[in-house]
Image (cartoon, coloured by chain):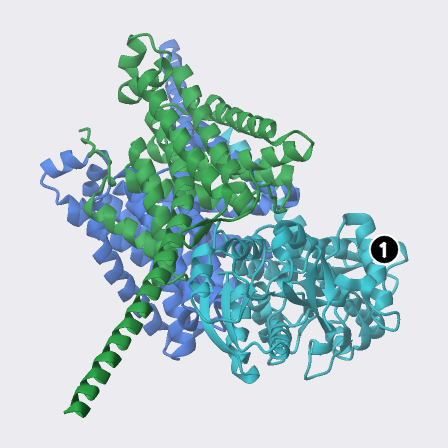
Amino acid sequence: MRHRGFYIIALIALGLPVLFPKSYFVEVNGTAIFFNAALAIGLNLLMGYAGQISLGHAAFFAIGAYSTAIITTRYGLSPYWAMLIGLFLNTCISYVLARPLLKLKGHYLAMATLGMGIIVHIFLVQTGKLTGGPDGISNIPNLSIFGFILNTDRKWYWAAAILMLMTMKLSLNIADSRMGRAFRALHTSEIAAQMMRIDTTSAKTQVFVLSALIASLTGSLFAHQKAFVSPDSFTFFFSIELVTMVVLGGLGSTYGALFGAAFITLLPELLSSIENYEVMIFGLILMTTMMFFPKGLYVTMIETFRTQLGVKMALNSWVNSKRIHRC
Amino acid sequence: MFKRFLTLFLATCFAWFSTISAHAADTIKIGSFLALSGNASILGDPELKTLQMYIDEINAAGGVNGKKLELIYYDSAGKTKEANDFVKKLIKKDDVDIILGGTTSGETLAVIDVVEQEQVPFISFAGAIEIVEPVKKWVFKTPHSDKMAVAKIYEDMKKRGISKVALITGNSGFDKSGLKQLHALASQYGITIVADETYDNNDTDMTTQLTKIRGTDAQAIINFGLGKAPAIVAKNIKQLGIKLPLYESHGVATKEFLTLAGDAAEGIRLPAAALLVADKLPDSDPQKKVVTAYKTKYEAKYGPVSTFGGHAYDGLFIAVEAMKRAKGTDKAKVRDEIEKTKGFIGTAGIFNMSPTDHMGLDISAFKMLEIKNGNWEIVN
Amino acid sequence: MCGTTARIHHSVLLTITLIQHSALNIHNSILMLHSEFLQFFITGITVGFTYALIAIGFSIIYNASDVVNFAQGEFVMMGALSTISLHSKGIPLPLAIIGGVAITALAGVFLEKLVVERAKGASVINTAIITIGASIFFRGLAMVIWGKGIYQMPHFSGETPLRILGATALPQHLWVIGGAITLMVFFWYFFNQTLLGKAMRACSYNKTAASLVGIRVNTILVSAYAISAALGAISGVLIAPISYMTYESGTMLGLKGFAAAILGGMGSASGAVLGGLCLGLLESFSAGFISSSYKDAVTFIIILLVLFFRPSGILGKKEAERV
């Protein structure tokens, strides 16, 4: 079966709340993981497939979330209009920025995207009349899907899980498509890709816009789930966290992005008991994981598993062949 | 091998999840979220220390209604998003009986919806007037509001015949909410704002903004801020040779500010609670006994006192008194009793709560202080 | 007739006074503007030199090891805080500064030996995350050691403001500017005239070739990290009296230093200086003439525009892409 991993993940994600009913831990952290994973999967399309770093992804997430927050609370429009407006804004912004931004390479691109994220954050803090300033916007109405009102942690868990699974499926399909092959070519060598007559600029623009759209949609849902948005959720630290999720899981791996999101979201939860040393240990873990698993935790794990399995199978067939000989 | 590992892993996960959802009910659980790191940690740190110190003391004396108090707290770092997450956790996972905390106004405003929806009594340690105005059923606060701080500053300016002011504020929630009140109350006191400059709280130098202010016809400068920025502002004003009177907010009512700003702090006026000048209060002042006791106890254990720890003291004892009157921890009863708090003498003033006033302080609780010879003096 | 003359005379006189008056006004406002401008400039240039020093730190490490060290800002914080700690233990300031710089340089060596050296051959993005991890680690460590308080350092030569054509500066501002220039001259000499410096440059061009001519690449790497950390520490010590220090101060300074290095062109020392000064002046002038609320936004928008037109920074060389 194609994308067997996807179905296993879907089973686990949707099955967890059944296994652990009424678990605050599963419901709330699960929702956070799925939102982060959706963002990380989107970012992985850009970073892992198209090889373009972005340290400003929180900006697109913010634009989606604030579109929803502002339009639903101040103009009383339906959440779906708000979501569409957010998507539209993000399309325009990412499309306009894509060409000049993606011309940049390596650290220059990192700086430019970082700058973009910081600019958006400054506007969120300073345009108090529109965005509510540092205190943000609260009282964002509930979202209802086909008459099903999302108003409990459990319902949000399902919604976030479905969002994550949809993004994952999309990402997996893209990886298999002609577009995905073009992206991978881009990642390995842009010049080689150009020689293969792949329109690198338009491929990069497409993936940039796509990942911005995923971030926008996640942002809108995030705003509804929290019923509250403030600039703190969209700092450049969060952008860096997203990049870390992607790389820690395994650059270029969709499942890795989910794994990285889970790891980075749960780590502070696990470390919170050591209080003062929390920050230090977090840094240490980040540093050492990246040193010892440069391909990412998930990818390394899978590779080790495969080699072990491979060795076992080889051993088995060797033993079997001996048996046959004896016969 | 892999299978065994997997089963072991799943088993551990299962065990872990189940311990997390289990809880005992033989203590009174006090939940708290405070800014223990970040810009507002100067505020959050004494708040936590105060809570810990008095909860230990209450427990040593046998607890409340025969039950021990248990403090469960998280570091929200002054961030609204974290605060929102932690309050949900306090209510849904830790199952606390009451929430005390919320160092900054932003943090507090971010959790009001949750608290109201889940119906848990909540006493905030933050300033913004929006927290209790309009009144929210489950939300109370102990510090003076920033509206009162601004009113006190403007009152003092009126007495000195100042009518044109320049504002300089930072970009955190505390600054922004003070700024809002500065604009809102100006016309009421006949004050014109001739300059409105801002800085980033991480900035290392504010002379540019102050040079712009120097070019206006302002008669005084108001700096509403927290942390190291106000000290830099004070020093830069001195460097530029600006002779205008400088007003600070209650956000710098700490000994730390006095040492940081040094000479530059001379002559600065700020509104603050009686706690700072405990030893200078007349014996007839009803607050004198309470603030001196708190000050002595805190300073013996942790060093110089600040008004912020005092807000935690007030919050904790209002809650404890209410629980005693309610003879239990029933959330609705405790809430009703908090609302009935009358004549409670705290560090911030004398609290008289009512269904229309969930703060219970009036402007007389604020003293206008001036910094003289590196210490606070009451301005009469 | 006479009346007309008188009237003309009167109106001429009036015009002259008017002109004189407005000229005086203009003169005054020019003087005002002039002193304001100068003040913005002094502020901008001081902040700019701090950014420049941090940016040079980025460049040195980048040249030696192709790594952008995101823990550079933490070196600034560590240098200042350890100096303050030593000074508060009764050690005289100059000795405390040497001690603080040495401690930070040691942290730089630690970072190279235990982390970067072991992660050799890691991709750009991996090393970025490793150094981001290191910066979080250093910040956490500083929080454990120094707590969350705000620290101050005595000004090197008092706090009596100096008047310069209507603007003012503190002696410490001159220390920052003078210190930065001295360090820059020193580094120019170091990289162009000394053996170690030349070896470092050789390494930055081609490591294999450098090792073939007998340069110990590892020693060079360690010294690059030590020098860069020491440089960060010195800039921390220079600005701490003006701006105070907390365990978190390094992050923003590091970010600004990175922006300066990129604006000037990563790896170019003169680019780092130019980038730092531009950034400092941009911040100050946009706060002064545009809006203090949006000064950082204006600054970053300008950096973006510069990068759109010069994708390798102002002085950066356009890199040939490896196929």
Chain shown blue: that is: A
Q: Residue furthest right?
A: B61
Relative to C159, is B63 above or below?
Answer: below
Residue A241's spot in the image, x, y percent? 44, 46
Relative to B336, is A93 above or below?
Answer: above
**A56 and B197: which is toward the camera:** B197
* Residue kind at label 1, given as amino acid type: Glu
* Residue at (45, 43) in percent of width and height: C253
Residue C129's spot in the image, x, y percent? 42, 37
Residue B74's spot in the image, x, y percent? 64, 53
Query: On the rendered structure, is C47 left or right of C322?
Result: right
Quadrant of the snapshot with the C terminus of chain B = bottom right
Q: Circle 1 is placed at which residue position?
A: B57
Specify few, some or many for label 1: CA neighbours under 10 Å numbering under 14, 14-19, or 20 or more: few
Chain C is which colour?
A: green
Chain shown cyan: that is: B
Asked whether residue A41 is in view, the answer is no
Instruction: Name the quadrant containing residue C17.
Output: bottom left
Relative to A325, is C107 above or below?
Answer: below
